[in-house]
Image: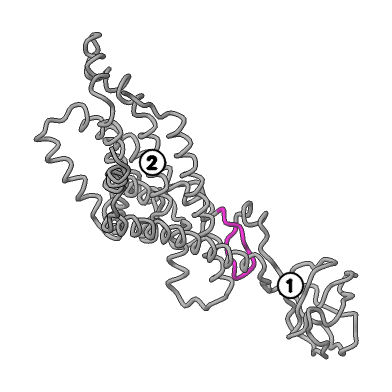
Amino acid sequence: MSSSQETSLVVALRRKPRRTETIIQTFLFLAAAISIFTTVGIVYELGRESLNFFARTQWEETNKQIAAPIAADDTRIEVTTSGAELQPGDVIRVGEEIMRVESVQSTSLVVQRGQQGTPPQAHRAALDIFTARKATLLEFLTGTEWAPQIGRFGVWPLLNATLMTTTIAMLIALPTGLSIAIYLSEYASERARGVLKPTLEVLAGIPTVVYGYFALTFMTPLLRAVLGKDVVEIFNTASAGIVIGILVIPLVTSMSEDALHAVPSSLRHAAYALGATRLETAVKVVVPAAFSGIVAAFIVAISRALGETMVVAIAAGAGPNFTFNPFKGAETMTGHIVRISGGDLSYDSIDYNSIFAIGLMLFLFTLVLNIISQRVVRRFREVYE
């Protein structure tokens, strides 16, 4: 073969440009990049506003007043005996002037005047004294009172209600969804599958606001009729959790059924050849083989239940309440965000910043669950040839 023939052969074998494939590849890359940038933007906004929440000074009423007029150069203030106790180091505000308490002697305060750039001023008697409060991470994670307007920054009432509704939902959704998935994968005929699958898809397509009113107008009266009106309040986390469980069942079923269906039929045939029944094969062979996919389905379902909004906003309650009784009203994190953001909420207020701190906590919950899901899938994934 001559050199010219070799050159022609190399040119002929050279990869030809495929413009359509290049366009599709570029489009897919841009889609992935947009999703990443969107996530980064969400995290940035949540983090920025959450930092504003923890850095913001909230002025809380002490129910104390100045007992006698003070001049601009006075450092001792006589105060009334009523109200909250003040401690050395507290930052207080009288009128527009900010002061720092150096010492407390009965009804007298020794203060540093004109703090944080405010000019010392003369003040008349009977002016209210406010004390500065800031949300700390420790109080946010351990406190049991949530009322940012008056300096109560404990998120546990909202977190506890969220965990209660999610737990109740998972007690309904996980066993029911897995049972349906096993039936569809191992027992159902083509006719039964043709009826059940579209029914589950209809359940998945119902707007969540409809589920919310279903919880309020059907599930709550049912619980009150069974357990008593004195036991079950009109707004309660139990009915909301049960309906969220019903809402999540199609998700659990679909993902679990896909995982079960992916198990090779050879494993089933081998179990039957050894004398196993269909139930034994499903429970002892197929489910363990699909364990990683089932766990992933469960964790995605938990994330979905944590982030559910309309059901809890309508049926669970409209006020923070730190209680472990599922039959009492309590507000979840998502329900609180909906209620606060739907009212007359001023921009850059303490309430405005607080919903971002709650949103960041929900994001971190979901992130942790996704990380756990990936680790479980990698740890227990089985590959069959």
Please name whichever residue, 205 or 109, is drawn nearer the observer in this view of the structure: 205
Residue 25: x and y, percent?
A: 33, 55
- Identify the magenta region: 145-156
What amino acid is labelled 1 in the image? Thr
Viewed as shown, does residue 179 lie left or right of 330?
left
Q: Secondary structure at mark 1?
A: strand
Query: Residue most toward the left?
Result: 191
Q: Is residue 360 visible?
A: yes
Which quarter shows the N terminus? Answer: top left
Please name whichever residue, 100 or 277, is drawn nearer the observer in this view of the structure: 277
Task: Work out whether mark 1 precedes mark 2 in sequence or the reverse, and give the earlier one.
Answer: 1
Residue neighbourhood size for the residue with mark 2, other residues' Cα within 10 Å, grouped as few (<14), some (14–19), many (≥20)? many
Residue 151 is covered by the magenta coloring: yes
Residue neighbourhood size for the residue with mark 1, other residues' Cα within 10 Å, grouped as few (<14), some (14–19), many (≥20)? many
Residue 367: x and y, percent?
A: 49, 49
The image shows residue 332, relative to residue 201, as above or below, that is below
Q: Give me the disc on residue 87.
A: none
Q: Is residue 225 visible?
A: no
Q: Which residue is mark 1?
A: 131
The image shows residue 194, relative to residue 262, as above or below, that is below
Residue 195: x and y, percent?
A: 12, 41
Residue 83 is covered by the magenta coloring: no
Q: Which residue is mark 2?
A: 170
What amino acid is labelled 2 in the image? Met
Residue pictured at 70% horizontal, 68% vertical: 133
Residue 329: x and y, percent?
A: 44, 55
Viewed as shown, does residue 130 lie left or right of 35?
right
Q: Secondary structure at mark 2?
A: helix
Q: Closer to us: mark 1 or mark 2?
A: 2
Please name whichever residue, 130 or 19, is drawn nearer the observer in this view of the structure: 19
Which quarter shows the C terminus? Answer: top left
Viewed as shown, does residue 35 lie left or right of 1?
right
